[in-house]
Structures are given as structure tokens and as C-alpha cells.
Image (cartoon, rainbow, N blue to C red):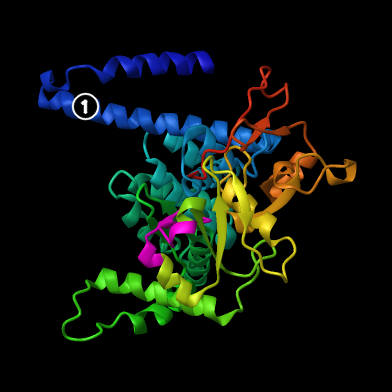
Amino acid sequence: MVEELAQADEAAAACVDAPAWALPEHDLIAALDAAHRLQQRLAAVTLSLIREIDGRGTARTQGASSTAVWLRERLRLTVPAARRLVDLATALDTGSPGIRQALADGAVSLEQARVIADAATTVQATAGTEAADKAVSLLTDWAGQFDPTLLRKLGTRILDHVAPDLADAAAKAALDAEAARAARDRHLTLSEQTDGRLRLTGTLDAETAGLLRAAVDPLTAPSGPDDPRSPGQRRHDALTEVCRLAVRTGELPDSGGDPAQIVVTTTYDALTRQLSSGTLDTGLSLTPEAVRRLACDATILPTVLGGTSQILDVGRQRRLITGPLRRALVLRDRGCAFPGCDRPPRWCDAHHIHHWADGGPTSLANAVLLCGHHHRHLHHSDWTIQLGGDGHPEFIPPAWLDPEQIPRRNHYHRRT
């Protein structure tokens, strides 16, 4: 298979620089159809390979918490996109073979295949295998006329055509399946921008959407007839207020043994002169004005850094013995330090590089932040950890994974 894919890759590469402008219109459209058909065939091959990798447990063997996370690192996909591929690969492997064949023939697109698989799963549960096969055949034919959105709408009433006596019961099953898909696909992504801002993207299920609107909508009204803010800006400010209210309740769960709090980092020189700009423990920068505003509502824990960004001292709260070291780890590692992991600090444990039971000290130089999965993985694998020359953790893979054992680092957490 590797040789055949290499040949296909060479053939596709030869077409990249082909002069499309020289083709007559008929050939131009034919070339587009052929390229699209080839894309679907390759998608079928990709799903087959993903299914095999998932079945073998390759991802966990190499240290990832799931196949989706491993695909993100390997293929540079988002985790939701990778998870959808894993789910579809499983559905095509365990469901009707007609869907996989249609994709391999280039008769349906990847999104259409996903729609047909979802509909077939619902029909299978309601009316059995024979009806599911009929549904696949019918929806595959319709895929030549309808895009995935319209095809999904048709799929919700497919039993009207393949098993009309069960259509009403199936409508309820389809509604339940849609709710299950909404729960499966729910996600919220916080992406750091280069200028310190966050971009929020995601999909909320119906219940969460209702809660968000109930909390945000009352705070989005204009403050008066001269309010210059746009609707989007008012929603932004409303979300800020909701977060402030949540922090003020004091009922948020602890994060690594510390209560919800703001940690501001500054240099020693700036600290001795005056309150200057600061950096949150998440890596985001704040203006002096923002620091002063936060000081009105939250405890500011000063972390003093030397000229080489080494931590000299950490602000203390007497009731939390482990708080300063924990905050120092967060400032250094920003989250799980294992290569390829994007878990935030609040999901992480502090791990002794040289085990405490073996005489290792409890200190910043002997600690690293690890999420639950990678904490367990480190204790049951041949990976080792060391601190690099700049004081940041490096992970040395076992020889069977990398014969040269080149140290690896986590690049998902921005470091300042």
C-alpha cells in the first residue's frame, strides 16, 4: 500500500503545476470532477488506516491520551476534526459496507458519508439491518443531488421510504440521535492570539446555549442612548461580567490546590519602581490599567523574576502550604509539559522528576506539570524527563520509539 500511495502522490504532484488555464472548459470541469473523486477515494484509504491505528492502540503506545489527540499531533488537525474522523472510521468499519464502498468509488464526499452513516445507525437501531442497507442505498443515490445539509434533513425521515410502518417511532429515535450527536460534538476552544487576546470558538448543546443566553442576555442591553458599543462588544462585556460574578461567589472549585485567583508576573526592577504591565499565569499580557482594575476584585499574588526569567520568589498565602510551588510550576510549564499535550494547568498534577520516594526533593527543579493521563503514562513507560539548559522540561522517548532518543518539548503552551 505504501508504494501505491507514493505513486499516487507523485501523480498528484505532477498535476499541481499543470497549466489549468490552458484547458478548454469541458476538460477543466472534467479535471475538477476527477480531482474531487480522487480526494474521496483517498479519504476512504485514510479512514481505513485510522481505524487500524485506533484498533491497535498505537496512539496510547506512543504516549497520546487518545487516537484523536495523536492525529492532531501527527496530521496537524484540530482535536474535534480528528475525533470526527475516528468516529467515522469506526462507523464505516462496523456498519454497512455500502457507505465505505461509495466513498471509495468517489460517489459521496466525506461529509455525505458521515451523514449517511449517522442515518444508517438510527435506522439500524429502529428497523434492523435490512432497512439500514436500504437507507444507505437510497441516501447514496440522493448524494448525487444534495449537499450534506439537505441530505441530513432527508435522512431524518428516511424510514418513510424504507420502513413506513416504523416512521413515527423512528422520528423520536432520530431526535434522540440528534441530541446524542449534539452532546458528542459539543466543544469550546480558547485560542491564544499573538497580541495576547483569546479567540473563542465552539459549539454548545441546546441546554448550555440556553444557560449562556439566560446569563448573558440581561447584561447585553445598551447602558443608555449614547452607548457606543456594538452588539458584539456588549456580548463580550456581558461575558466578562458573568465571569466576575462567578469568581466573586467563592464557590468555584480549587485549581491544583489553589482557589480561583489572578497571578500577575512582573520583573524585579518594575516591582521596585511601580506597578507596571503584567503577565497572567496563562501567558497573556495585561496593561497597567488592566492590572489595577483586577486589583479591585481579586487577590494579586506577585511573582518576582530575575533578569533571566528565573523565579526568585512567589507571593504566598499562609493557608496554602503548596501554593507557591504550584504557582511557580504553572508559570514555567503553562500546562501539561508532555510533548503534544494541550491540557491546561488546572487539569494537571505536579510530578517529581526524581521520585520523592527515592529521595527526590520537592522543589521547582525536580517538578513538572503533567495531566492525569501523562502522569500515569510516565509512571508506566520508559520515557524520562530532564530540565534543559533554560530550565524547561524535556522528555526523552524510549529507544524503541526513537532510536536516537532526541529530547522533545511541548510547543502548545506559549512561553514568555
- Residue found 33% across the figure and 55% down from its top: 149
Q: Is 402 one of the magenta-colored residues?
A: no
- What residue type is disc 1 on? Ala
Q: Position of residue 349 (x, y in %)?
A: 70, 53
Question: Which of 174 and 391 lies nearest the eye of the viewer?
Answer: 391
Task: Indicate the quadrant containing the N terminus: top left, top right, bottom left or bottom right.
Answer: top right
Give the residues in magenta: 272-290
Q: Is 289 one of the magenta-colored residues?
A: yes
Question: Which of 259 and 237 lies nearest the eye of the viewer?
Answer: 259
Residue 128 appears in the picture as rendered:
yes
Q: Is residue 8 above or below residue 357?
A: above
The residue under label 1 is 30
Q: Position of residue 164 (x, y in %)?
A: 45, 65
Q: Is residue 182 above or below residue 406?
A: below
Residue 283 appears in the picture as rendered:
no
Determine the residue located farthest toward the front in the rendered image: 273
Q: Is residue 62 above or below residue 368?
A: above
Question: Which of 7 and 301 lies nearest the eye of the viewer?
Answer: 301
- Is 123 positioned to the left or the right of 35 in the image? right
Is label 1 in a helix, a strand or a loop?
helix
Q: Is residue 294 above or below residue 71?
A: below
Q: Position of residue 373 (x, y in %)?
A: 70, 48
- Residue found 45% across the figure and 71% down from its top: 294
Mark 1: give few (<14), some (14-19) or many (20+) Cα within 10 Å.
few
Q: Position of residue 267 (x, y in %)?
A: 49, 51
